[in-house]
Image: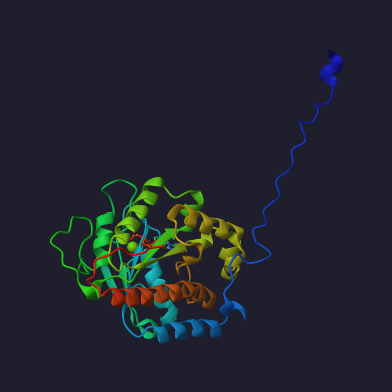
Amino acid sequence: MGDVLSKAPQPMEETPTPPKQEPLLAEPWRTHKILSDGWTEKVHKALLDDIANKLKENINVVFIGPVASGKSSLINSYFTTVLNRITSKAPAGRGLTSHTLHLHQIRAVNQLKNITFYDTMGLEEAAGKGLQTERAQQIAKGEIEPGTKLDKDIVDTVEKKELFQHCIVYVLDGENIKLGLKEDLRKKIAEIKERIKDMPSGPNRVVIVTHTDNVCTEVKDDITKVFNSAAVYEVIKKVHNVTGVTFGNIFPVKNYVTEQDSVEQVDILLLLALQRIVDFSIDAIDRSNNDNYSTKGSNSVD
Ligand SMILES: Nc1nc2c(ncn2[C@@H]2O[C@H](COP(=O)(O)OP(=O)(O)OP(=O)(O)O)[C@@H](O)[C@H]2O)c(=O)[nH]1
Ligand SMILES: [Mg+2]
């Protein structure tokens, strides 16, 4: 007996220690040709020139997403990319319910002058709270006048071609996604997708994942590490799985929140996403011209 007790505990069955995931991958999970020479001022200018050259007519871009996901900050960040200063065109702030209550129409400037951004009230988990999916569809169709409060039913609407949205940008907080997108929010986003699918010549969609600085410390320290970050990659994969949006159409960014000045690399990441939004908006315009706007039919949403 004493013998048994005095025996040193035997090691349990040998279990392999899982390989430690390095925070930074040796190879980037996404490459952009334009970044091959680095994240330089030249690249910033090339992206802005490319966007400006493509924008021959006005495009409407609406931001939709959960409360505090960074929709308003994103609009301010885009103004920073062309004004080289911190801006507050769309009121931003954190709360349990949406800081933005109205449909805000904000026309961009300089190289982005042909883009009109639309800021919306945040989606909430609880049924009947926050932006309703029907309201999102009405906005996409151009049925809601800018300045309208979005927390109530809006009836007897008329579609206005000039308010028709060419791209819906879903804005998701990467930090929240890391923890797991709440099922009720996922359902609301899926419901909006279904409603858009029913629209003739409906808008295209892109996802922007904000708060990447809070997803990965290495990215917080150096934004140019974003495409090498294993944590950001996992978040983008998760977004793809829960929203069904094509992986390549999901873009990580970091909004301007703590900075006092604009930063070349922060701008570049924001502009890579905007470049896709512009391309897809032009595609939506072409589709609507081909379909002759009033034609009834089904839209193919990815
Ligand atoms: N660290 C970090 N904070 C961010 C980022 N984007 C937004 N925020 C912060 O998140 C909070 C919410 O940002 P908003 O832009 O107001 O979010 P919103 O989606 O417009 O929110 P609602 O209008 O309430 O639906 C603010 O405190 C922002 O400073 C980001 O990329 N990184
Ligand atoms: Mg807002």
The C terminus sits in image quarter: bottom left
The N terminus sits in image quarter: top right
Residue toward you, 21 or 90: 21
Q: In the rendered view, does 219 fall on the left or right side of 283?
A: right
**Number of numbered discs visible in the structure rendering:** 0
Task: Work out whether 56 lies above or below 247.
Answer: below
Residue toward you, 130 or 190: 190
x and y percentages locating residue 146 in the rendered image: 22, 69
Question: Which image quarter: residue 106?
Answer: bottom left
- Quadrant of picture, ligand 1: bottom left
Residue drawn where x is 57% and y is 74% of the image: 32
x and y percentages locating residue 18 in the rendered image: 70, 46
Q: In the rendered view, does 172 fall on the left or right side of 125?
A: right
Residue toward you, 74 or 154: 154
Examine the rendering and report whether any part of residue 91 can be seen.
yes
Task: Work out whether 274 lies above or below 229.
Answer: below
Residue drawn where x is 51% and y is 76% of the image: 268
x and y percentages locating residue 63 in the rendered image: 35, 65
Examine the rendering and report whether any part of residue 86 can be seen.
no
Question: Which image quarter: residue 82?
Answer: bottom left
